[in-house]
């Protein structure tokens, strides 16, 4: 028989054995192609300047990340290939016994890898093409581009990049196959299935002590993370201590759980001796004891996956809502009165070459005053936990605005006026970092003295209006709303020019005129432009969401594939045990049930521990993002659950079917 016919015959005969290997290749190719093809979507060609820069940054980061992930996928695919070689060691031995040279055997295996890889590459590209269209639609949504501009397109650049990457991986696989075949001995191949692993079990006392030590390490890490957060600090070493404790506690937990769990089930004799439970418990204990380091690593990767995907998607959704709430105008320009002086701000800008009257359908100028006391004095008596970004706020003057200015700003937003009797005051705050302190200050000061005038509290509720846009979203840390006559007696801090564009205005044209004044350090001008803010918000959404989902998807793929390969390898190694169970009278249904529960517990153990870790770490990660971006984030786990059901659940089902088929073939006499 020629080598070509033998390759084709072997591929057809072992195609079902390669299910996990083929699935891993297919998903890896589809993910790699889909994420690298986003940059070729034609709908992104008409984006604004700011959004284009962020989009290009996203493409560069995805390309860099893809290069790093390619090495990880190469390791995974090589590892999966080694499982196939181990599964076919007796077949290799028969080839050698029949006189076939090792060089020809290596060529046969290289041909098989090429055939399977070619099929996986073709199927992966087809699936990746469909996936890329869905990702492009999501990207259009995140970048706030009309989805009707979407066009289905096949990315030749992504195809070349994917083909080049996986060609390199297959060359590596072929080199590993050649090395393995050239170094094996015939006796090892023929007796491979008779070799048993030797695992040294821990004593009952040592297992209990290690189990308690593992729980102590994990609990210590949890307490330190909850108390001090998840960011390292030079002043406080709790992050490093928590990391070491978690790194030590996780493998100890899986190692000791193998003995402690078995002892706990043995204590319930009616359960332990029911059906094949005794065999099942011993098998699970052996897996945990043998693979505790792998389970610990997978647990860590799953924790990163859950946190990355959940935080990324939740942040994107929160920022979308914030972008809509924090930009009620098309443009506002601020002028520092102490630098530029008081006066008509539109006229000052016109003198600087920025004529906004030609672009604006509506212009209003308002002023913000200094109340005469600081936020630290205003919040006196409270235990104030300032965010790191707000450390200078206690020494800043409390802001104040005249009632008429506020109502003119609200009128531009299409809102009704606020009413305030003489001799009273109101409070406005839309910044999460200080809102609770402003509420407490309002309750603590039913009467407030401003510029020597006693004012009574007009309402027990704090308004949450946005009367000025800032580049960091809602950033009103607390503003007094005062009668006009009283506000006029205060020192003016800034003038603000509010603008709504005329229909058909090109925002980029306005921004181009504003750029010079924003860079002019001799003046105190600052501006916030709605479309630029949206671009920044949606651009960050895309960066955060895509990078987190890309990393999370690849890590999830790695975890599921490693668990599947380990389960298949152990099932193949212990095949004689299932044959012995059948000889002892175990039914086919009992064996299938034992295989199912082995696989289920092996997959569920690291996921359950990772879920507990993630419950703590997600909350702390959310706090870090909130502090950094000045926004409140609501946890959204829907996408994470769907992703795990699709990838993790798919590998679990594929593993169950493969293990069941392997045992069935053994029972039917197929080698």
Image (tube, rainbow, N blue to C red):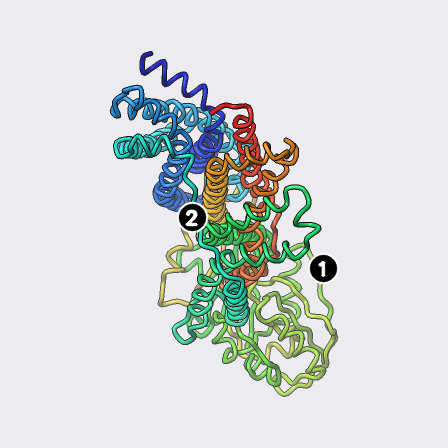
Q: Residue at x 57, y 32 (%)?
A: 660
Find out whether the residues at labels 2 and 1 contact each other: C-beta distance under 8 Å: no
* Percent of width and height locating residue 577: 53, 37
Q: Residue at x 52, y 28 (%)?
A: 666
Q: Which residue is mark 1?
A: 416
Q: Residue at x 52, y 60 (%)?
A: 621
Q: Which residue is mark 2?
A: 198
- Spatial CA distance of label 2 from label 1 is 79 Å
**Residue 310 vertical position relative to residue 88 in the rendered view, above or below:** below
* Percent of width and height locating residue 584: 61, 35
Q: Residue at x 54, y 62 (%)?
A: 204
Mark toward the start of the polypeptide (2 vs 1):
2
* Percent of width and height locating residue 167: 32, 30
Query: Can you see residue 40?
Result: no
- For the residue labelled by badge 2, is the local secondary structure a helix, a strand or a loop? loop
Q: Quadrant of the N terminus?
A: top left
> Which numbered mark, 2 or 1, is in the foreground of this view?
2
Instruction: Sort mark 2 into few (<14), some (14-19) or many (20+) by Cα contacts within 10 Å.
Output: few
**Residue 362 vertical position relative to residue 40 in the rendered view, above or below:** below
**Residue 478 vertical position relative to residue 61 in the rendered view, above or below:** below
Quarter of the image for residue 179 reads: top left
């Amino acid at each position: 028989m020629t080598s070509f016919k033998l390759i084709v015959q072997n591929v057809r005969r072992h195609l079902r054995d390669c299910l996990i290997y083929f699935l891993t290749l297919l998903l890896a190719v589809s993910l790699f192609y889909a994420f690298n093809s986003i940059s070729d979507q034609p709908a992104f060609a008409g984006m604004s300047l700011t959004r284009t820069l962020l989009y290009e940054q996203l493409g560069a980061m995805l390309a860099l990340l893809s290069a790093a992930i390619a090495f990880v996928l190469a390791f995974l695919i090589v590892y999966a290939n080694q499982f196939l070689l181990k599964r076919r060691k007796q077949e290799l031995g028969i080839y050698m016994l029949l006189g076939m040279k090792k060089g020809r055997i290596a060529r046969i295996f290289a041909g098989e890898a090429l055939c399977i890889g070619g099929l996986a590459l073709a199927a992966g590209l087809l699936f990746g093409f469909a996936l890329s269209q869905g990702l492009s639609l999501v990207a259009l949504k995140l970048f706030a581009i009309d989805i009707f501009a979407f066009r289905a397109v096949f990315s030749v650049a992504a195809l070349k990049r994917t083909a080049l990457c996986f060609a390199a991986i297959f060359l590596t696989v072929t080199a590993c196959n050649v090395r393995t075949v050239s170094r094996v001995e015939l006796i090892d191949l023929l007796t491979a299935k008779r070799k048993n692993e030797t695992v040294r079990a821990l004593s009952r006392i040592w297992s209990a002590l290690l189990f308690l030590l593992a729980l102590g390490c994990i609990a210590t890490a949890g307490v330190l993370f909850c108390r001090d957060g998840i960011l390292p600090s030079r002043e406080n070493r709790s992050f490093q201590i928590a990391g070491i404790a978690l790194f030590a506690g996780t493998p100890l937990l899986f190692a000791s759980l193998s003995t402690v769990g078995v002892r706990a089930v043995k204590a319930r004799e009616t359960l332990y001796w029911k059906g094949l439970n005794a065999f099942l418990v011993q098998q699970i204990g052996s897996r945990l004891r043998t693979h505790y380091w792998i389970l610990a690593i997978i647990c860590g990767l799953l924790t990163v996956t859950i946190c990355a995907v959940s935080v990324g998607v939740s942040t994107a959704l929160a920022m979308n809502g914030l972008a809509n709430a924090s930009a009620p105008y098309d443009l506002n320009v601020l002028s520092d009165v102490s630098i530029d002086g008081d006066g008509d701000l539109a006229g000052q800008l016109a003198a600087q070459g920025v004529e906004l009257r030609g672009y604006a359908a509506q212009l209003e100028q308002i002023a913000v005053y200094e109340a005469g006391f600081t936020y630290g004095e205003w919040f006196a008596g409270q235990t104030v936990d300032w965010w790191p970004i707000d450390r200078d706020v206690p020494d800043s003057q409390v802001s104040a605005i005249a009632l008429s200015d506020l109502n003119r700003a609200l009128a531009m937003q299409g809102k009704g006026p606020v009413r305030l009797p003489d001799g009273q005051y109101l409070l406005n705050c839309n910044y999460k970092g200080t809102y609770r302190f402003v509420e407490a200050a309002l309750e603590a000061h039913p009467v407030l003295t401003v510029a020597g005038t006693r004012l009574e509290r007009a309402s027990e509720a704090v308004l949450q209006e946005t009367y000025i846009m800032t580049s960091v979203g809602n950033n009103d840390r607390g503003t007094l709303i005062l009668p006009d006559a009283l506000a006029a007696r205060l020192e003016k801090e800034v003038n603000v020019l509010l603008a709504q564009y005329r229909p058909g205005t090109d925002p980029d044209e306005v921004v181009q005129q504003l750029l010079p004044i924003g860079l002019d350090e001799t003046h105190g001008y600052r501006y916030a432009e709605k479309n630029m803010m949206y671009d920044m918000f949606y651009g960050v959404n895309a960066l955060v969401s895509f990078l987190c989902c890309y990393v999370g998807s690849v890590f999830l793929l790695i975890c599921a594939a490693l668990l599947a390969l380990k389960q298949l390898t152990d099932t193949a190694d212990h095949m004689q045990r299932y044959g012995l169970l059948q000889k002892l009278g175990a039914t086919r249904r009992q064996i299938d049930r034992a295989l199912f529960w082995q696989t289920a517990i092996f997959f569920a153990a690291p996921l359950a521990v990772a879920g507990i870790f993630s419950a703590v770490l997600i909350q702390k990660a959310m706090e870090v993002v909130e502090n950094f971006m000045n926004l409140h984030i609501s946890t959204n786990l829907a996408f994470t659950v769907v992703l795990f059901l699709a990838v993790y659940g798919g590998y679990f089902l594929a593993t169950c079917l493969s293990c069941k088929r392997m045992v069935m073939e053994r029972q039917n006499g197929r080698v």
